[in-house]
Image: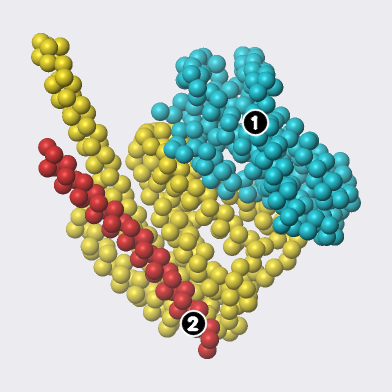
């Protein structure tokens, strides 16, 4: 396992470099938008990765609620955290693309931007909840919140969808077929980012495992320490047994 | 089923009686939303013709903030003297407790809304251009949407450090579609420019989905240790 | 072409965000290693 990690890191780095080369050099320039459109090679794969991670978070939370297995909880936590990072990338690159193409940084009525923002908010609140509660109950509360967040997403999407149809706003130039080279580049970038996300999740998972071990060791030590001091303070009752 | 309703009713009556004697939640909510109204009045020009377009948002933001005040007090009351632990070990169904608390909050927030709405009407010179009766289902469904999740998340944030601040952090992101529905429906009715039907259906869906979710997960939250 | 600036800004921003997150992970690992050492000393 430990030897696999550096090998995978090197592979991912090479893959990402190749994907970058494809995105900047191989893929043709867009007829309408010029070279700025190449932002989608980072924007769209990040969005798909984030959605996939949040989906895994939801499944893992359900599994936790049914089976109570700590592993499922750790998977849920890791996926939510890395998903928030990728979602942040989406939210940052989106406006950078929108400024030269639409002429505005943010289109408040645009469905994808706004629902991504709400998604981001929900999972940030999930991480905040995990941060501010302690003990075993955290996992149960977080799993319940993850279920609520997942239930909320379709409602968010539909509410903004209807809102938008009333207030027309510029949307991503839909329709039309993509150049196959563009599609391939997009998929290669997604694959590269999936590898990258997997690596990050793996490290975060190991971090979580070590952290829980350290916490357990701390608890054990304080328990032993308390036992020793109890023994010292009550020598008769303890030593007689 | 019978015991569910009798326990719900008993808890609800107890909460209402407590509130009737102290009027803690209601007074603080009322004063809080009054402050919000006054601050909004200074921040926006209430006499402008377009105030009809923004007042839907103002009303619901005021109610949302005020209901957080009440929701934070819901469970804090049961922490004293370990009442909540007594609930936990009692054979009473967990959902009965949740329903009672949610209904209690629903009543308090509805009373607040009934008292505050005339103030908004006076301050902003409102007269409704759309079908006014639709404001009643929007108000009822919107209030339930806030309160059902609010009661649940208040129970959740009870287990966290700095729980007072935790509730809005959990409640607001999840409530965004509901708030959007309430505000858009109210604006649509006030201006009479378009139909509010979609938003009422949206609120209804939201209520059904999250009431089911709350009822199926509340037992887990109550017994989480 | 002015718009090319936005392209580079987006790519750089992406990697900055990832680098920042990896940085927090490394820091947390470091802190844990130290705690682990202290625990070992305590025993």
User: Chain C is which colour?
Assistant: red
Q: Is residue B215 something one can see in this rendering?
A: no
Q: Residue at x 42, y 42 (%)?
A: A132
From this viewpoint, which residue is outermost toward the left? A239
Image check: B202 left or right of A46? Answer: right
**Residue corresponding to mark 1:** B25
What chain letter is assigned to the residue under label 2?
C
Front residue (pair B124, A51): B124
**Residue corresponding to mark 2:** C5
Task: In the rendered view, tell whether residue A115 sits above or below residue A45.
Answer: above
Front residue (pair B37, A182): B37
The disc at residue A164 is none
Please tell me how crowded label 1 is: few (under 14), some (14-19), or many (20+) other residues with Cα within 10 Å: many
User: Chain B is which colour?
Assistant: cyan
Which chain, by letter, is yellow?
A
What chain letter is assigned to the residue under label 1?
B
Task: In the rendered view, tell whether residue B186 sits above or below residue A222.
Answer: below
């Amino acid at each position: 396992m430990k030897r696999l990690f550096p090998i995978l890191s090197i592979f991912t780095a090479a893959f990402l470099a190749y994907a970058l080369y494809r995105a900047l050099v191989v893929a043709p320039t867009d007829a309408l938008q010029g070279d700025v459109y190449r932002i989608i090679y980072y924007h769209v794969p990040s969005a798909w990765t984030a959605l996939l991670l949040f989906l895994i978070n939801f499944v893992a939370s359900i599994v936790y609620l049914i089976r109570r297995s700590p592993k499922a909880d750790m998977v849920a936590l890791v996926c939510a955290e890395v998903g928030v990072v990728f979602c942040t990338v989406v939210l940052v690159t989106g406006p950078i693309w929108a400024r030269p193409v639409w002429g505005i940084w943010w289109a408040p009525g645009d469905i994808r931007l706004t629902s991504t923002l709400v998604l981001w908010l929900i999972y940030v609140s999930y991480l905040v909840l995990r941060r501010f509660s302690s003990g075993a109950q955290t996992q149960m509360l977080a799993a319940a919140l993850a279920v609520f967040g997942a239930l909320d997403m379709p409602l968010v999407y539909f509410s903004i969808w209807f809102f938008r149809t009333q207030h027309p706003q510029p949307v991503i130039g839909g329709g039309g077929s993509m150049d196959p080279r563009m599609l391939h580049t997009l998929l290669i970038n997604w694959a590269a980012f999936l590898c990258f996300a997997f690596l990050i999740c793996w490290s975060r998972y190991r971090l979580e495992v070590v952290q829980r071990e350290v916490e357990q060791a701390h608890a054990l030590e304080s328990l032993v320490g308390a036992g020793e001091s109890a023994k010292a303070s009550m020598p008769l009752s303890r030593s007689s047994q | 089923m019978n015991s569910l309703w009798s326990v719900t009713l008993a808890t609800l009556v107890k909460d209402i009686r407590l509130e009737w004697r102290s009027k803690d939640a209601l007074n603080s909510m009322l004063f809080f939303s009054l402050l919000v109204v006054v601050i909004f009045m200074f921040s926006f020009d209430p006499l402008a013709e377009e105030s009809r377009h923004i007042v839907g948002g103002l009303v619901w933001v005021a109610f949302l903030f005020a209901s957080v005040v009440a929701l934070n007090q819901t469970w804090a009351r049961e922490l004293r003297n370990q009442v909540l632990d007594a609930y936990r070990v009692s054979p009473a169904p967990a959902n009965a407790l949740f329903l009672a608390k949610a209904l209690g909050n629903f009543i308090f927030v509805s009373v607040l809304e009934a008292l505050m709405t005339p103030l908004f009407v006076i301050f902003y010179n409102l007269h409704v251009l759309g079908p006014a009766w639709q404001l009643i289902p929007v108000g009822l469904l919107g209030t339930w949407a806030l309160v059902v999740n609010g009661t649940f998340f208040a129970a959740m944030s009870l287990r966290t450090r700095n729980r007072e601040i935790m509730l809005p952090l959990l409640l607001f992101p999840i409530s965004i579609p509901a708030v959007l529905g309430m505000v858009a429906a109210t604006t649509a009715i006030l201006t009479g420019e378009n139909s509010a039907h979609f938003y009422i259906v949206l609120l209804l869906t939201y209520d059904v989905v999250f009431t089911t979710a709350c009822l199926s997960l509340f037992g887990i939250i109550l017994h989480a240790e | 072409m002015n718009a090319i600036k936005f392209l580079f800004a987006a790519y750089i921003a992406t990697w900055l965000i990832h680098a920042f997150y990896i940085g927090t992970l490394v820091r947390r690992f470091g802190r844990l290693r130290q705690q682990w050492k202290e625990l070992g000393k305590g025993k």
